[in-house]
Amino acid sequence: MNPVHSLSLSAAAVAAMTLAGSSVWAGSFTFSTGDTDGKIAVASRPGSLGKIEIEAADDFILGAATSLNHASFTGLLSRGVVPSDVQSVTIEIYRVFPKDSTNPPSGNVPTRVNSPSDVAFDTRSSAAAQLSFSASVLNASFTAANSVLNGINKIPNQVTGGEGPVTGTEVRFDVDLSAALLLPADHYFFIPQVQVAGGEFFWLSAPKPIVGGTGPFTPDLQSWVRNENLAPDWLRIGTDITQQGPFNAAFSLSGDAVAAVPEPQTWALLVAGLGIVGAVARRRHQPNPR
């Protein structure tokens, strides 16, 4: 074997394999804000007959492209409703303003800095058979110290102080996504919405700063809320509405970090490397001229 040809073949093969290997990587992802602290309970529901939509949001960070396939969140079912009264669960993902938003905003809220964007980045719903869920009772009677349901208003009426304590069944929802959420590396907000018959679902708060959870946590933004009358704007639950926070919300996420699709130039280099391999191989098999 010609040593020059051998060296060229090895170098080209290593280059091609290196390029291929750099775009094929996976690992597990987990995130959790920990257990609830019971400081506040915030309604979050899809719109239905006689009820306007309410969205409560808390943030998480993805350092790499990730396929999310499981989520959990903890809340209250009020007015005597039980898990069998749950009709649907929806999961929404928003990016951080000003992405997916009109900028400058309307001016109907104190600020949009670090809020969720105007519109959702992606959504999954049990009604569309994109997820399945189970609800486990953690406490038959749990009281949150304060609540937000109807007091979600434009300025100058945004400060309501909350609507007082609320008691209900503490429930943990576990959600399996049959249609995984494929998200590029970015900063996001997670929004669970629960539709129940005869009562309300309230998402419970978690400690801020986070204790007992799994990160990354920097930066850890506070939780936000809006209803369809306030949309596309959002209010900070602690800073704008109750002036008792800021708060996080009790939830966790899990999935797999996945390889980003290679950039066009990476594919070009890979193809070029493989072409060199083929060319060298052909030269090796050609008879030497005499």
Image: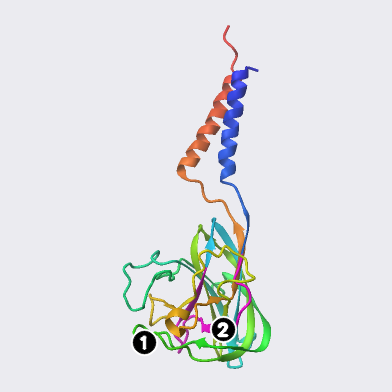
Residue under label 2, please give it: 39
Compare residues 198 and 253 and report the one nearer the observer. Answer: 253
Q: Nearer the viewer, residue 84 or 139?
A: 139
In the image, residue 198 sits, relative to residue 172, either above or below, namely: below
Q: x%, y% of residue 165?
A: 55, 91
> Which secondary structure lies at badge 1?
loop
Residue 257 lies, in percent from the top left, at 59, 56
What residue span does the magenta drawing correspond to? 31-59
Instruction: Establish if 247 lies above or below 216.
Output: below
Q: Amino acid at mark 2?
A: Lys
> What's the magenta bit mostly, secondary-structure-wise?
loop
Q: Does residue 226 appear in this view?
A: no
Give the residue type that dot 1 points to.
Asn
Residue 45 is one of the magenta-drawn residues: yes
Q: What residue is disc 1 on?
A: 157
| Residue 79 coordinates in the image, percent (x, y) | 58, 93
As rendered, which of 138 and 128 lies closer to the eye? 138
Q: Would you call the spot at circle 1 few (<14 residues within 10 Å), some (14-19), or many (20 or more)? A: few
Point 45% across, 83% down: residue: 243
